[in-house]
Image (spheres, helix red, strand yellow):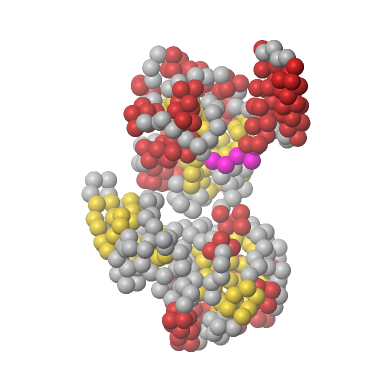
């Protein structure tokens, strides 16, 4: 897993500007840093170079431009600050980080694909930064360069984040399972707690690849490592938002058809209720169909609260599927409105799995976090919370759902939510792999003992784009939905 993480990072840095830094998480201060860097560069050039005539005037104009940019940048943000937005951390880096020959890179990710266990690493790579970036910029970076880069990459410090409810030994167990690391619980130390979320530092006395550093690079690594405690203790920490929390405040507008073929708009739907629960489901999704009768009952109870449910059938994109959806709804006794997909619906209602329910006010604004999975006993309470103005209730988003089956099931569906038959799914342990083809419902099943397995879609039928992502199962029997795109 570490190898894959590094290779993704290398691929990402090939397209960025020449600098000694790369960062794997989004920063809100990238523009400010660029302004400061350009300002300092122009200032240095003026001190060192002599210009005459028109060249002087032209350069002076450029200098004034970057001076203006620097003034426009956030004065409260130091150019040495870096915000790992996805993880909720701002590091205040010492000047020594900016005067090195090697390459420094921070990468982070939610290793559980939505369950909120974050793993972030500040890496140092003992290669010449100027040569590396020149090759990256000129697209002359070879496999040998990549191998050297990987073998010379050493973790400077590690930060792990997880819910306060998760015990430290469980945090380590989870990171090790998903990242194929060998961290030990005794190396974990609490840095900060914010909103029931804990940030931990991890101390590693024998960092991976340290022995591979050559010449002065080892001393350079030791030099920046001396600041680890200062950086981690002085960083700003704030609980990271889940994907669904980030969607709160988005306004949804659309025109589509209901399941009977009648034109309908978002305003017609949302203006009828104080809160509308948009339940996104599909005809092929057993959990979706299974909860429909209970959703009908909940909808009747919500009427007294001036709230209601609207279904969005994600695969109702043609006459035959619309007819199948109508038949399912009729069999389940559903009377509330169900609508068909529209252009951009999957961006408005971005999902991690099926079904997912979103909560929208009378103006079409998402007002609270979504609920992933068929969780009928949570919907009504969630709506009551939204009516009371609570927009930050956290519901874990997952791509894999625990169920009562005695096997792992992988469901492959396309970007219209239709099941994909004949997709080859690879199911791997550390040393062996199995293959299975999806059936007419897009399902491939594996009855191996409960554990954490790697999942890949190795081959798709004609007409689909290859999906090269890697997925991980839950450590219990569970169902996973993998989306692929049509060509």
Question: Could you say which quadrant of the image residue 309 lies in?
Answer: bottom right
Residue sitting at x 58%, y 66%: 358
Give the image location of residue 204, x and y in percent. Answer: 42, 28
Q: Main secondary structure of the magenta part?
A: loop
Whether residue 302 is situated above or below residue 58 in the rendered picture = below
Residue sitting at x 37%, y 51%: 468
Whether residue 325 is situated above or below residue 97 in the rendered picture = below
Q: Quadrant of the N terminus?
A: top left
Q: Which residues are magenta?
A: 25-29
Taking the magenta stretch, the answer to whether it contains residue 26 is yes
Q: Is residue 268 left or right of residue 447?
A: right
Q: Is residue 184 visible?
A: yes
Give the image location of residue 403, x and y in percent. Answer: 38, 66
Between 125 and 245, the residue placed more toward the observer is: 125
Residue farthest along the front direction in this orientation: 54
Q: Is residue 323 left or right of residue 311?
A: left
Give the image location of residue 128, x and y in percent. Answer: 45, 21
Whether residue 240 is situated above or below residue 280 in the rendered picture = above
Question: Could you say which quadrant of the image residue 213 lies in?
Answer: top left
Q: Is residue 337 visible?
A: no
Residue sitting at x 36%, y 37%: 3
Taking the magenta stretch, the answer to whether it contains residue 11 is no
């Amino acid at each position: 897993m570490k190898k894959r993480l590094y290779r993704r990072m290398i691929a990402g840095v090939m397209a960025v500007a020449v600098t000694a830094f790369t960062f794997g998480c989004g920063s809100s201060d990238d523009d400010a840093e660029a302004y400061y860097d350009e300002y300092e560069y122009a200032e240095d050039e003026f001190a060192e170079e002599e210009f005459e005539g028109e060249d002087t005037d032209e350069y002076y104009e450029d200098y004034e431009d970057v001076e203006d940019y620097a003034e426009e940048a956030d004065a409260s943000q130091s150019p040495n600050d870096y915000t790992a937005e996805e993880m909720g951390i701002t590091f205040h880096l010492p000047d020594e980080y900016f005067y090195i020959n090697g390459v420094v890179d921070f990468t982070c990710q939610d290793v559980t694909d939505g369950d909120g266990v974050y793993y972030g690493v500040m890496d140092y790579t003992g290669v010449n930064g100027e040569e590396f970036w020149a090759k990256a910029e000129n697209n002359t970076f070879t496999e040998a360069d990549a191998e050297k880069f990987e073998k010379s990459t050493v973790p400077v410090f590690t930060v792990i984040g997880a819910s306060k409810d998760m015990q430290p030994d469980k945090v380590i167990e989870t990171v090790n399972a998903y990242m194929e690391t060998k961290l030990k619980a005794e190396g974990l130390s609490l840095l900060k707690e914010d909103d029931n979320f804990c940030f931990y530092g991890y101390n590693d006395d024998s960092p991976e690849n340290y022995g591979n550093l050559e010449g002065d690079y080892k001393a350079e690594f030791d030099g920046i490592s001396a600041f680890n405690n200062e950086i981690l203790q002085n960083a700003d920490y704030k609980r990271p938002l889940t994907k669904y929390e980030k969607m709160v405040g988005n306004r949804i507008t659309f025109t589509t058809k209901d399941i009977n073929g009648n034109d309908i708009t978002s305003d017609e739907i949302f203006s009828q209720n104080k809160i509308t629960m948009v339940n996104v489901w599909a005809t092929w999704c057993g959990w979706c169909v299974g909860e429909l009768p209970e959703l009908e009952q909940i909808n009747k109870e919500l009427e007294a609260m001036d709230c209601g449910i609207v279904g969005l059938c994600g695969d109702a994109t043609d006459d035959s599927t619309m007819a199948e959806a109508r038949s399912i709804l009729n069999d389940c006794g559903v009377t509330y409105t169900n609508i068909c997909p529209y252009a951009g619906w999957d961006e408005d209602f971005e999902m991690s799995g099926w079904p997912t329910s979103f909560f929208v006010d009378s103006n079409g604004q998402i007002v609270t976090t979504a609920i992933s999975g068929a969780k009928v006993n949570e919907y009504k309470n969630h709506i009551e919370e939204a009516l009371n103005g609570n927009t930050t209730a956290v519901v874990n988003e997952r791509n894999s759902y625990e169920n009562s089956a005695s096997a792992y099931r992988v469901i492959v569906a396309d970007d219209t939510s239709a099941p994909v038959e004949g997709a080859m799914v690879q199911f791997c342990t550390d040393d062996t792999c199995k293959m299975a083809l999806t059936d007419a419902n897009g399902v491939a099943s594996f009855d191996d003992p409960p554990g954490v397995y790697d999942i890949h879609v190795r081959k798709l039928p004609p007409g689909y784009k290859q999906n090269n992502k890697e997925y991980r199962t839950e450590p219990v029997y569970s169902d996973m939905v993998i989306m692929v795109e049509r060509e």
